[in-house]
Amino acid sequence: MTDKKKGNAFTDNPLVRAVGLQKIVVLLVLLLMIIFFAAVSKTFRQYPTILGILDGTYYLAFLAMGVTFCLITGGVDLSIGTGMFCYALAGGFLITHKDMPVIVGILVTLLCGLVMGTINGLIVSRGGHAPFLATLCTMMIVRGLGAIITGGASITWPSHSSPNGWTRMLFKLPVDRTMYPVGIIWVILAAILLSIFLNKTRPGRYIIAIGSNKEATRLSGINVANYQMLAYIISGFCTGLAALAYSSAYQSMAPSGGGGIELNAIGAAIIGGTSMSGGSGSIAGTIIGVCFMSVLQSGLPMIDLQANYQQIIIGIVLIVAVYIDVLKNRKLAR
Amino acid sequence: MGDVILTMKGIDKSFPGVHALDHVDLELRKGEVHALMGENGAGKSTLMKVLTGIYHKDSGTITYEGREVEFSNPREAQDAGIVIVHQELNMLGHLTVAQNIFIGREYMKGKLIDDKKMNEEARKLFDQLGIDIDPTETMSRLTVGKQQMCEIAKAISHEAKVIVFDEPSAALTEAEIEELFKIIRDLRNKQMGIIYISHRMDEIKVITDRVTVMRDGGYVGTLITKDCTKDDIINMMVGRVIYEDPKTESAVAKDAPVVLKVEHLNAGRMVKDVSFELRKGEILGFSGLMGAGRTETMRALFGADPKQSGDIYVNGEKIEIRTPQDAVQHGIGYLSEDRKRYGIVVDKSVAENSTMASLENYMKGMFIDKKKENDVAQKYVELLRTKTPGVDQLVVNLSGGNQQKVVIAKWLVRNCDILIFDEPTRGIDVGAKSEIYQLMNELVEEGKSIIMVSSEMTEILRMSDRIVVMCEGRKTGELGIEEATQERIMHAATLRE
């Protein structure tokens, strides 16, 4: 066992220690990536491209922030990808097919997320199911449910120009024929609120503690099941928000879709330093991971790498991120 | 008894900070059942691990069948004919009996496993032992006793010449023990050498030919079983060691109020009708051998494990404890025997661990008051003399003794009046130990009451005002400190129903 001391001027720097080395490294790589794409590809530098990248970032950010809570408890939520489609289909269906007010559609979308999150939470915390299996099952359930609600039809949320199109302006505001990406505001706001919740409140503290050592937390007289459930409720609600962001960005969605998106969200959280084995993670890290993911996904096609190569590159990035996590855990286990 | 088959001479083994084996001798003959006895931590298991190559001795010689051997792993020992039947069964529950017996050395037919042949061979083994087990039965469907028989069959199938039984009877019923003894006698008649580790005095008298006693890692002596009494063996196990300042009288008044009363507590197999009282300002020691049900009693009391029945009174008032939350509400704190698993959150800070059980008192509105939290953590770091660079240090970076202090701080911050200390000094070095003792004395002086579960006789005699002794899930004795001696405690601890 040659456990070398890894301390040096850089890692001992108080700022570096406070922010976390992994986040700084990922952030630097992200910046280098943006510079690289911008230098190589002319399209990447153009405003519509940037808007496009942001469209792809909002919903992923909400999903990833939500699932971060589940990951921190040592669990996972696989139902968020298909769930996002299902909730957006349900809300959109009421607006377009049942002539309900837009606000009703929005509220129903959010409510669906909340309800599914609660169901996930109940199955995991009371039923004692492994989170992976529990949410794999609900992932299938919501996939079927979305198609049943709409009768198998695709749903298109109201467009910008229609009287009901104001929902889309929540994320992209047109002023003098220029689009302003106001969605950033909501994402940042949500990130700040969730970050405060995670780090400064009792439920947040307990969620982290559960992921670190569930048994010790229980023996400290804390109702572990309740706080574990809360993590899934948060994830569900964030999925509702993601559904709104998605329908605003892409307007229409097909039933039974959304599968695979959950893996991008989980991947983003892990790149941002959230541990797959629970106990550590941060909202700021997740946001950095989300940006990393969406820049990579938008940038690679612009240097003429097709989708298949993107998958490979993202896969490799994830292996590296998880390996860093493994190294961190090994240090704790010694 | 036949010729000597195995001799271990002058076996010495040290781990960092512990001299686990100090020149231990053991001689085993063919056709002999040889008991290996000693208190918890006397070094019995370590000696057997040295024998089978799990540990490597620092010095000494092992002579087996006339030549010196040193096995580098259990597999080598097994191939030479030395096998251990472990206390915890190493069985693969989903596989069949025959598949378990031949795991790792399956009979093959070409490239495929020959299950039929394995079943036949297993059946032959069982016939040889005179036991009735279906080789095609799934292992997990057998009783613990039958599983043990399978372990023995597996051992014999290795053409064993020496079999070590490590507390084989711990989980068996009377009838199963009878059957086990029948098999052991049978093996003895076949001229095998058998080492039998057990805490049960009565069994030793029944089944063994000779007894070797160990104490504190050292060799005490070997006796012929039929020539000695139970008390002779206990005296050898306990020894005449003079322990530093044992308590001679209790400082607690006879009429001090009872803060905790437990009546007829039953939980699982390991807690049977346990009743006791804890008085204010008292340290109540819980003594007993490994597996006596002490930790299980405490966990059931604290609500960590479910209980079947029993009443609990705190300060004379009957209370309901279903979960640890309930216990904490009533001012009971539990310091677990397994600190890392149940006590602390290793990758969190000293401050976060300190306020874990009472975070609601360190809030400013909705938010955690970090300053208040750090202040209280700092206060207890100073009070308990915890050695840490600061309260934001991660607990993983502290030593065992200091981690233990953080857990104590957690319950003091919560202001618990009843503290359950389960093996409070396990894995802690000597200096930190006496600090924990001092701390416990200070706590009871302040009017807190402590239940201390300990497997160390020294610790029990040094700290307790009163001692409850348990054996196999039952309370088998209760002694005031003025009347307590090691012999009396050990006597109660080996008292079977």
Image (spheres, grey):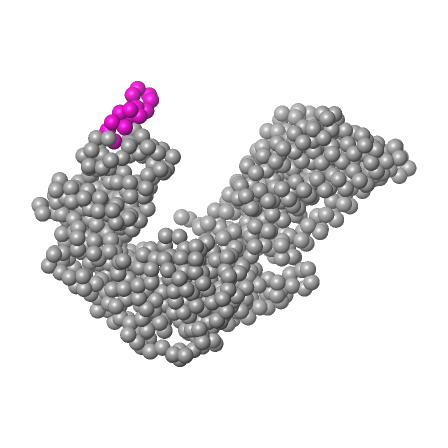
Residue at the far right: name it.
A176
Front-lying residue, A178 or B375: B375
Q: Is residue B351 left or right of residue B72?
A: right
How many numbered tags mark residues here?
0
Q: Name the outermost residue toward the left.
A: B2
Does the magenta portion include B115? Answer: yes
Q: Can residue A28 be seen here?
A: no
Magenta stretch: includes residue A227: no
- Please report the residue visible at 49 percent of the width from the left and 71 percent of the height from the top: B315
Look at the image and give the residue range highlighted in magenta.
B107-122
Q: Quadrant of residue B219?
A: bottom left
Does residue A142 appear in the picture of this structure?
yes
- Measured as percent of width and height from the top left, residue B183 is found at 19, 42
The foreground one among A289 and B172 is B172
Rendered location of residue B482, percent (x, y) = 30, 76
Residue drawn at x 36%, y 68% as measured from the top left: B285
Residue at the spot 53% in from the left edge and 69% down from the top edge: B415
x, y percentage for residue B277?
A: 40, 69
B445 or B240, which lies in front? B445
Left or right: where does residue A257 sit relative to residue B312? right
Direction from residue B326 to residue B91 in the image, left or right: left
Among the 4 quarters of the image, the one containing residue A304 = top right
Residue found at the far top of this picture = B110
Q: Is B262 rendered above or below residue A305?
A: below
Q: Is residue A49 above or below residue B12?
A: above
Q: Residue at left 41%, top 60%?
A: B265
Q: Position of residue B85 (x, y in %)?
A: 26, 44
